Amino acid sequence: ALVEAGKLHEALEHLSRVIQGEVATAGDLQTEHARLTEVCAAWDQGVVAMDGGDFELALQCFSFVERASSSPKVVVMAARAAVSSGLCDRAITATLRIIKADETNADAFAVRGRALFFTGDVDQGLKHLRESLRLDPDQGNTARALKALRVVSDCMTRGKEAINTRQFG
């Protein structure tokens, strides 16, 4: 249950305590403990890779973790790595599933907003980023991204207007 909630390290600690007290089923528990240790190591490696800008490695790590846990926390991190790796369609699909299940997940809205923007759906991207900030106003990265994307959006709008009125130069 803890793994499905995305509390990987807490699940590993709990399992370690159970193994110390149980001898009869230690074989099965130790197998699960080894698997969960791998999952936690992959999670930690993915976080370090994201922080270091190695998005492909982060995506590999989080994809491995997703096989053990489909919690929103895990799926959002995998989607964030996917966007940073240029796999926006994957992120759009994953975050849509999260948003349908929980319309208050600000992180999913933020990642989906970036992915939509990068695929050219500027209006929807901005809409999702605004919703993310409405849900969690303390998201500094999302606020900065929204500000930057508004500037890009305004430039695109002015460019389209210039083309429509044939004002070149």
Image: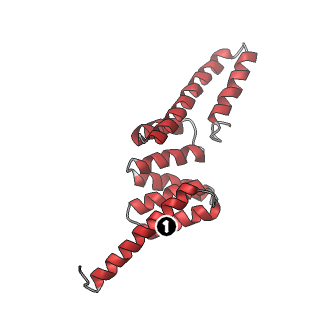
Q: Residue at x 58, y 58 (%)?
A: 99
Above-or-below relation of 144 to 42 = below
Q: Quick check: can you spot residue 96?
A: no
Q: How is the image coloured?
A: secondary structure
The percent position of residue 118, horizontal first and vertical second, equals 39, 59
Look at the numbered disc 1 and give the secondary structure of its residue. Answer: helix
152 or 64: nearer the viewer: 152
The percent position of residue 71, horizontal first and vertical second, equals 60, 44
Q: Residue at x 42, y 49 (%)?
A: 84
Farthest residue, direction right: 21
10 or 36: nearer the viewer: 10
The image quadrant of residue 130 is bottom right
Q: Quick check: can you spot residue 143?
A: yes
Q: Quadrant of the N terminus?
A: top right
Question: What amino acid is found at the position of numbered circle 1 in the picture?
Answer: Leu
Q: Residue at x 33, y 82 (%)?
A: 161
The percent position of residue 56, horizontal first and vertical second, equals 40, 40
Q: Residue at x 73, y 22 (%)?
A: 18
Q: Horizontally, is 8 left or right of 114 in the view?
A: right
Farthest residue, direction top: 23
The percent position of residue 48, horizontal first and vertical second, equals 50, 36
Q: Horizontally, is 126 left or right of 169 in the view?
A: right
The image quadrant of residue 68 is top right
Above-or-below relation of 123 to 73 = below
Q: Which residue is mark 1?
A: 126
Q: Horizontally, is 34 left or right of 115 in the view?
A: right
